[in-house]
Image (cartoon, rainbow, N blue to C red):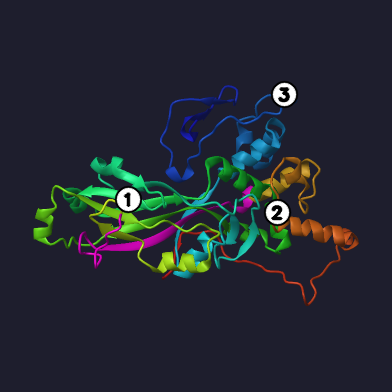
């Protein structure tokens, strides 16, 4: 159910599905089945309570299961696109896969252990291709993408935007819910203040933008091949586990080429021997949560008797523990008295890193 269909009945303050209203796309969420706490029975909150964040938290924490609350919180994300230097893109697409990173300097503070080292980026779709050519997009055996275009379609295209993702829907939800369940602990581990919690993000996908420059087909060649197919091949994307040299070759080399050969074995001498020249650009889509979301998770942990400075809450809900959170647990087991007394201070060999800024839409020069 869309948020635009959710209404509050003024007669009894219950939530009901009603006529659909258009809601700002940046503020739209979709609701699905959430597990209710079967032991809780109560009247719905008053109309006034909907304006009281504390009252609503108390009501929802009694009405919904902890997993449902975390699932709902995971949808309250802010998305932003990122265009960075080649080195930044390589870092985020390889070592940053399945990681939580600082949007200011790209440093990783936690990694999700469930990400298979054999995971590969999957082609999810393309924007900008003529409707007549949409059924002629083919993923080759080596994971390269082949676009089959007629001469008239080549002239029609201005930009192709190919989308790639690393996660299935199920894996993605497991990743972000696991993160939220233990984020307060990891922030504490790194000495990150609440004001900076919103500056940490997880990348969801990336896109390769192919900008077709002014058409430079030789007129005679166009006439000669007007009834034939033009093939545009896009090189396969490396996997996160590939050696850095593989990523550098992909990032700094040409990512696509034209051919009249359906298998791509015959390549032109230059990029414009067959089709128009193409400018390439890589962008990353990432999401982050504001500090109120994390504060709610911490309140939920305390409400149910868990110490936010441990992974016990996440473990009780069956979530995978992030690398970084488990390190803190081991440290606590090794020095219980220091943590119980609260007098631990970093020594000369200890590093406490504080990361600034907030999650914003930002573009850096390549």
Left or right of 191? Residue 166 is left
First in sequence, mark 2 or 1: give its number.
Answer: 1
Pointer 3 residue:
41
For residue 36, what is the image quadrant? top right
Indicate left or right for 25 with 213 as reference: right
Give how far across and how far down residue 154 sits, in percent.
Answer: 21, 52
Tell me if mark 2 has few (under 14), some (14-19) or many (20+) residues whose alpha carbon lies within 10 angstroms of its own: many
Q: Give the Cα separation between the discs numbered 1 and 3.
A: 57 Å
Quadrant position of the C terminus in the picture? bottom left
**Residue 354 visible here:** yes
Going from the N terminus, do you reach mark 2 or mark 3 first?
Answer: 3
Q: Which mark is residue 184?
A: 2
Q: Is residue 201 left or right of residue 87?
A: right
Part of the protein shown in magenta: 264-293
10 Å crowding of disc 1: few (<14), some (14-19), many (20+)? many
Which residue in the structure is indicated by mark 1?
146
Q: Secondary structure at mark 2?
A: helix
Depth check, mark 1 against mark 3: the one in front is 1
238 or 329: nearer the viewer: 238
């Amino acid at each position: 159910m869309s948020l635009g269909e959710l209404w509050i009945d003024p007669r009894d303050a219950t939530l009901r599905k009603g006529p659909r209203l258009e809601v700002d796309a940046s503020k739209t969420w979709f609701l699905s089945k959430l597990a209710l706490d079967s032991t809780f029975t109560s009247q719905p909150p008053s109309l006034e309570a909907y304006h009281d964040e504390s009252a609503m938290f108390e009501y929802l924490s009694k009405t919904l299961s902890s997993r449902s609350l975390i699932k709902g919180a995971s949808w309250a994300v802010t998305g932003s696109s990122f265009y960075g230097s080649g080195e930044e893109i390589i870092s985020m697409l390889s070592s940053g896969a399945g990681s939580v990173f600082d949007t200011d300097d790209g440093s990783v503070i936690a990694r999700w252990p469930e990400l298979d080292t054999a995971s590969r980026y999957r082609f999810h779709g393309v924007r900008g291709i003529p409707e007549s050519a949409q059924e002629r997009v083919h993923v080759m055996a080596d994971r390269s993408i082949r676009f089959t275009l007629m001469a008239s379609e080549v002239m029609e295209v201005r930009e192709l935007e190919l989308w790639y993702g690393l996660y299935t829907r199920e894996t993605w939800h497991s990743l972000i819910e696991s993160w939220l369940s233990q984020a307060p602990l990891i922030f504490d581990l790194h000495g990150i203040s609440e004001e900076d919690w919103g500056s940490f993000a997880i990348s969801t996908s990336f896109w390769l933008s192919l900008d077709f420059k002014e058409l430079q087909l030789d007129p005679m060649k166009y006439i000669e091949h007007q009834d034939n197919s033009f093939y545009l091949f896009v090189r396969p994307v490396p996997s996160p586990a590939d050696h850095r040299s593989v990523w550098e070759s992909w990032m700094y080399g040409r990512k696509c080429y034209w051919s009249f050969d359906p298998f791509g074995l015959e390549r032109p001498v230059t990029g414009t021997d067959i089709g128009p020249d193409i400018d390439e650009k890589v962008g990353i889509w990432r999401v982050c949560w504001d500090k109120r979301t994390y504060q709610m998770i911490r309140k939920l942990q305390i409400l149910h008797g868990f110490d936010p400075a441990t992974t016990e809450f996440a473990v009780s809900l069956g979530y995978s523990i992030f690398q970084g959170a488990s390190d803190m647990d081991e440290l606590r087991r090794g020095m219980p008295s220091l943590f119980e007394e609260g007098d631990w201070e970093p020594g000369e060999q200890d590093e406490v890193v504080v990361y600034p800024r907030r999650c914003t839409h930002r573009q850096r020069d390549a």
